Every structure is written in C-alpha cells, then in structure tokens.
Amino acid sequence: MEFRGFIAVNNVTLSVNEGTVHALIGPNGAGKTTVFNLLTKFLTPTRGQITFRGSDITALKPAEVARLGLVRSFQISAVFPHLTVLDNVRVALQRPSDLATQFWRSSSILSTLDDRAMSLIDAVGLSSYAHLPAVELSYGRKRALEIATTLALDPAMLLLDEPMAGMGHEDIGRISDLIRRIARNRTVLMVEHNLNVVSDLCDRVTVLARGEILADGSYDTVSADPRVREAYMGT
Ligand code: ADP
C-alpha cells in the first residue's frame, strides 16, 4: 500500500485460517492499521489481491465486505451512550436489513428481535446490565457491548483493533474469555499490544515491522526469533 510515494505495507502475504484467533503485532507504524483498512476495504491496495472465503474482495466496497461476513470492531466505540445496552443491540440488529424496520409494527418481529438481542447480550456477559444506559458501563463492559453490536452483523470473521487497550486485569480476563467463545464458530484477527494476551489467546501470530512481515507462526516460534526480539521487543 502506497501513500503518495510512501510504502506503508509491502509484499504482505497474510493468510488467516478459519476458526483461529490470529494476532497481528508489531511496533507503532509497522502497518497494522493499514492492513486492517485494506482487509475491510477502507483502503484499496495499490497492488495485490485480497480473498475472503474463496472470493476475491479486492474491488469491493466496505459495506459489501461486511455483508460477506468480514466485519471490524472499531477501537472508537460505535455505542450510543444514552441508549440502554438492550437498545444499542436492537439498533445494531436492525442495521443490516431494512426488513426488520419495514415490519417495525409487527409484534412478533419485535419479540424475535428482542430474543436475538438478549441472546447476544448474554453471549457477551452483559445480561445483568441490559437495561442500563451504555454510558454507565465500565470501560471493559462498554467494549463487550461494542463487540455485541459487531456480532449482531453475524460475521464469519471479526477484526478487533486492540480490544484490550486501556483495560485492567479483570476486564482483560473477561474480554479474553469472550474472544475465546467467539472463536468457537468464527475467525478472529486482532491487533494486540499485550503480549501476555497474545500468547494466551492466539493460535498464530504475524509480526509486522516497517510494512513487511518479519515472522509468522506460533507465539513461541515468533517470540524466539532474534529479528522479532530486535525489532519488536527491543532486546
Ligand atoms: P500501525 O497501525 O502498525 O501503528 P499504520 O498502519 O497506522 O501502523 O501506519 C503504517 C505507516 O503508514 C506509518 O508510517 C504511517 O505514518 C503511514 N500511514 C498510514 N496511513 C497513512 C495515510 N493515510 N497517509 C500517509 N501515510 C500513512
């Protein structure tokens, strides 16, 4: 990917296996966000190809990629602070299809919507908070709600941009458990700075540095690589 002559990501061949939790790590400026932007088509690559579940998505628009099931959870939450947890998830569930709003008056559709919303809220561990305005949630629970709104799109693959950023120990544990549960039937690609989380949670790690892949493999393999230690861990 080239920005006016500056090559931010070069020759990156990244393959993420279905059903795995895959980490993308590297120092600041390595190109991690650019890779996320390329995968979700917020950027179009200057060269190269992106395929998702066998389809070439290189020329698609972000909404089309999301519709195919490749969805990104933003670091800056898209949660509405003054809506309750339940209303936030209801809104998210209605977004993908106009059909639900079309039948807004139908009580059976509404109850189905509520059932689906509650099961998502339950899945992210927020059942006790369903009727609380989002603004009153702890930071970690807000992130869990944000993940619930992303899961409302029923993605096959979820891209998480630093899901543990700014979190304390307890919230990190909670979000790790949530990601493990999500990965039972979905693929997760996450940018994560906390290497304990990476080693604990991720099946595979790709290390980027200066826009190129430095190493790729299990956490133990990449963390033992002297080039990774030099570029990333500073040792
Ligand atoms: P990371 O997420 O790993 O910190 P980024 O993908 O944000 O890295 O950035 C990789 C490099 O590309 C950086 O040097 C950054 O300054 C540059 N870059 C990113 N986006 C743009 C842009 N829109 N225009 C120019 N340069 C950019």
Image (tube, rainbow, N blue to C red):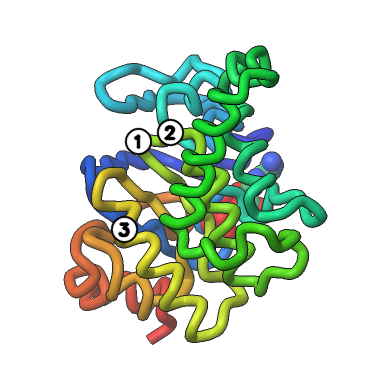
53 sits left or right of 36 in the view? left
Give the residue type that dot 3 points to: Arg
66 sits left or right of 101 in the view? left
Give the residue type that dot 2 points to: Leu
The reply to whether callout 2 and callout 1 are in contact (CB within 8 Å) is yes
Which one is in front in this view, the residue at disc 3 or the one at disc 2?
A: 3
* Alpha carbon separation for disc pair 2 and 1: 6 Å
Q: Which residue is mark 3?
A: 181
- Give the camera-side residue of 116 and 220: 116
How many C-alpha atoms fall within 10 Å of the one at disc 3: few (<14), some, or many (≥20)? few
Give the residue type that dot 1 points to: Ala
Decide: is 153 above or below 182. above
How many C-alpha atoms fall within 10 Å of the one at disc 1: few (<14), some, or many (≥20)? many
Residue ID at (48%, 71%) = 193
Q: Which residue is mark 2?
A: 70
Q: Which residue is mark 1?
A: 156
* Alpha carbon separation for disc pair 3 and 2: 18 Å
Q: Position of residue 60 (x, y in %)?
A: 50, 17
Residue ID at (26%, 41%) = 15
